[in-house]
Image (tube, rainbow, N blue to C red):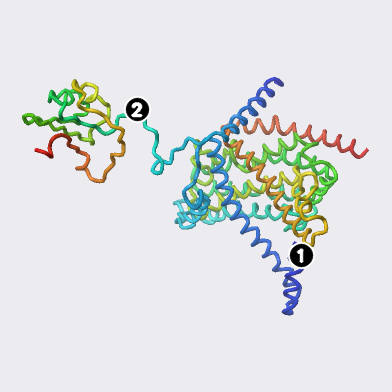
C-alpha cells in the first residue's frame, strides 16, 4: 500500500499538485480496489455455495449460463439491478433506504482491515483486531432499522432476533480474541501474523478458541444453523421481507461479503494469515533465492495463501450449513450463554497459563 | 451432563462426515430435455391399439373411470378414440381387454398447444 501511495504522490508532484491533496484523495484507490474485489468475490462465493450445496445433496447445481454455469450469478445480479425498487405503504422512507447502506458499509470497512499480504494492508492501525470486532457488530444496527422501518411484523421480529443474537455471540469472540492477543502480545493483525512465524500457528495452542470463534462467526454472519433473523419457515425472510431490487441486493452482498471477511479474519488470527505452510514460499523454491522479482512474487503468493485458507474455512461453513438444522431461539441463547461463554473464559485462562510457561 | 455433551459432539462429527461423504457420490439429477430419464418396463404412457385383435366388446369403455375411451364399430372396422384431456393413465383398459388389443407404450411426451390434438383416434380409419 505504501508503494502505491508513493507512486501517487510522485505522479501528483510531476504536475505541481501539493502533497496534502494526495493525502486526502489517496483513500479513493483502496476504496475502488475493495469495491471491485467485493463484487467479484461475492459473485464467485454465491456460485461456489450453490455448487457446493449441490454436491453435498447429490445435485448438479447451476450449470446452464455460460461455461458450466459460471455466469449464473452474474445474470442474477443483473436481474436484481434491473428490478423495480418498491416502497411499500407505511414504511419509514428514510430509515428504509438507509438500512441496507448501514449494513453494507461496516462490512466494506472490515475488508480494509485484513492484511492480505505483508505489504498489502489498506488500513494498518495498531489496534486493528479490536477495531475489527467493534465494526463487525455494527451491521446489526442496519438490520434492526430494516426490521423497524419495514412496517412488517416479520421484519421487526427478524431485526430483534438479530440484535439478541449479536449481543450474545459478541462476548465469546472477544474472549477468544483476547487469548490470541495474549499469545501474540499484540492486537495488531499484522503483528499477530508475524508472531506466528516464529511459533506455531495459533490454532494449535488455542484449538478450543478456534472452535468457539468458528461457531460464533457463523452466528454473527446470520448463516445456518443460526439464521434466525431470516428464518424462512418462521419469518418468511426476516428483516428483508419488504426489500426488493438493488436494496435487497445490498443485503445479499453484505451477507456474502461478511462470510468472506469473517473467514479471512479467522484465517488471519488462527491459521497464520498469509504465511505459507512451513514458512517456505513456493516461488522461492521454484525460482531460487536470487531471483530478481522474488519479493514481488512473494507478495502475490501471500495473497493466494490467504485465499486458500479462507476458502477452506468457507467450505467448512458451507458444510455446516448443509448438515445442521436451524436452532430455536432458546437453544441459540442457551448455547451461547451456558456453553460457549464459560468455555471461552476457561480457554482464556488456559492460554494465559501457556503464555506464562512459554515466557518462563 | 458430561456424557450428554460427548454424545452431542460425537453425533455432530458423524453428521458432518456423512454429508461430506455425499460429495463423492455422483449427482442423481437428470437434465431432462438433453438426456432422457430411464423409463421402467411397466410404464403407462400413450396407448397402442391393434384393430385386428379388437372384437368390439366395449369393455374398455365400461371400465374406464374417466370415460376417456370410445369404440366405434362399423361392420368389421373398429376405431378407438382416446381423449387425453380425461385419461388418467390408470391402465384399466389394457388390463381388462380380453384380446389384449390395447397396449401402453413408453411415450410420455404428450404435451401439445392445441386442444384438438389431445383427442387421438386409432384404427382402420385411413384405409377405408
Q: Are marks 2 and 1 in contact (CB under 8 Å)?
A: no
> In the rendered image of this protein, does residue A267 appear above or below residue A37?
above
Mark 2 residue element? loop
Towards the viewer: A173 or B13? B13
Q: Are marks 2 and 1 on the same chain?
A: no
Q: Secondary structure at mark 1?
A: helix
**Where does the image place residue A297, in percent across and percent down from the top left?**
74, 57
Q: As rendered, which of A320 and A109 lies closer to the eye? A: A320
Residue in the picture at 44% in, 38% down: B30
Q: Position of B47 compared to B20: left or right?
A: left
Label 1: which residue?
A: A3
- In the displayed structure, would residue A131 be above or below residue A3? above
Q: In the rendered structure, the residue with mark 2 lies on which chain?
A: B
Residue placed under numbered mark 2 in the picture: B41
The percent position of residue B116, horizontal first and vertical second, equals 19, 42
Chain label for disc 1: A
In the picture as drawn, the residue positioned furthest to the right comes out as A360
Please tell me how crowded label 2 is: few (under 14), some (14-19), or many (20+) other residues with Cα within 10 Å.
few
With A15 as the anchor, is B98 left or right in this view? left
Eye-nearest disc, 2 or 1? 2
The residue positioned 70% from the left and 20% from the top of the image is B1
Amino acid at each position: 500500500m505504501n508503494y502505491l501511495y508513493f507512486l501517487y504522490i510522485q505522479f501528483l508532484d510531476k504536475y505541481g499538485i501539493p502533497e496534502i491533496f494526495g493525502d486526502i484523495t489517496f483513500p479513493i484507490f483502496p476504496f475502488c480496489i475493495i469495491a471491485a474485489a467485493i463484487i467479484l468475490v461475492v459473485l464467485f462465493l454465491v456460485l461456489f455455495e450453490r455448487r457446493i450445496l449441490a454436491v453435498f445433496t447429490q445435485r448438479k447445481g447451476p450449470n446452464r449460463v455460460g461455461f458450466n454455469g459460471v455466469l449464473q450469478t452474474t445474470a442474477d445480479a443483473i436481474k436484481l439491478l434491473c428490478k423495480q425498487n418498491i416502497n411499500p405503504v407505511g414504511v419509514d422512507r428514510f430509515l428504509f433506504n438507509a438500512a441496507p447502506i448501514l449494513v453494507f458499509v461496516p462490512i466494506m470497512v472490515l475488508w480494509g482491515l485484513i492484511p492480505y499480504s505483508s505489504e498489502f494492508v489498506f488500513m494498518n492501525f495498531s489496534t486493528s483486531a479490536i477495531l475489527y470486532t467493534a465494526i463487525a457488530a455494527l451491521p446489526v444496527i442496519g438490520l434492526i432499522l430494516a426490521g423497524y422501518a419495514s412496517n412488517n411484523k416479520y421484519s421487526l421480529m427478524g431485526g430483534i432476533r438479530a440484535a439478541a443474537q449479536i449481543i450474545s455471540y459478541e462476548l465469546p469472540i472477544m474472549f477468544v480474541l483476547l487469548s490470541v492477543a495474549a499469545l501474540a502480545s499484540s492486537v495488531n493483525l499484522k503483528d499477530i501474523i508475524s508472531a506466528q512465524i516464529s511459533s506455531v500457528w495459533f490454532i494449535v495452542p488455542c484449538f478450543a478458541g478456534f472452535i468457539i470463534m468458528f461457531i460464533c462467526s457463523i452466528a454473527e454472519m446470520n448463516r445456518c444453523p443460526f439464521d434466525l433473523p431470516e428464518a424462512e419457515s418462521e419469518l418468511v425472510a426476516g428483516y428483508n421481507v419488504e426489500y426488493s431490487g438493488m436494496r435487497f441486493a445490498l443485503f445479499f452482498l453484505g451477507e456474502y461479503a461478511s462470510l468472506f471477511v469473517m473467514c479471512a479474519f479467522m484465517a488471519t488470527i488462527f491459521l497464520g494469515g498469509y504465511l505459507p505452510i512451513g514458512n517456505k514460499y513456493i516461488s522461492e523454491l521454484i525460482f531460487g533465492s536470487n531471483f530478481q522479482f522474488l519479493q514481488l512474487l512473494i507478495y502475490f503468493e501471500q495473497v493466494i495463501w490467504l485465499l486458500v485458507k479462507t476458502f477452506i474455512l468457507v467450505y467448512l461453513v458451507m458444510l455446516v450449513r448443509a448438515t445442521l438444522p436451524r436452532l430455536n431461539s432458546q437453544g441459540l441463547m442457551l448455547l451461547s450463554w451456558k456453553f460457549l461463554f464459560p468455555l471461552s473464559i476457561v480457554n482464556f485462562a488456559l492460554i494465559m497459563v501457556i503464555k506464562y510457561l512459554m515466557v518462563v | 451432563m458430561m456424557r450428554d455433551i460427548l454424545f452431542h459432539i460425537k453425533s455432530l462429527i458423524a453428521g458432518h462426515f456423512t454429508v461430506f461423504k455425499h460429495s463423492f457420490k455422483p449427482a442423481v439429477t437428470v437434465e431432462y430435455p438433453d438426456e432422457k430419464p430411464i423409463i421402467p418396463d411397466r410404464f403407462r404412457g400413450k396407448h397402442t391399439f391393434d384393430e385386428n385383435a379388437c372384437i368390439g366388446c366395449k369393455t374398455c369403455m365400461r371400465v374406464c373411470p374417466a370415460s376417456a375411451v370410445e369404440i366405434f364399430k362399423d361392420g368389421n372396422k373398429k376405431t378407438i378414440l382416446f381423449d387425453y384431456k380425461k385419461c388418467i393413465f390408470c391402465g384399466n383398459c389394457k388390463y381388462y381387454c380380453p384380446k389384449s388389443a390395447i397396449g401402453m407404450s413408453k411415450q410420455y411426451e404428450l404435451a401439445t398447444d392445441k386442444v384438438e390434438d389431445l383427442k387421438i383416434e386409432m384404427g382402420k380409419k385411413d384405409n377405408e
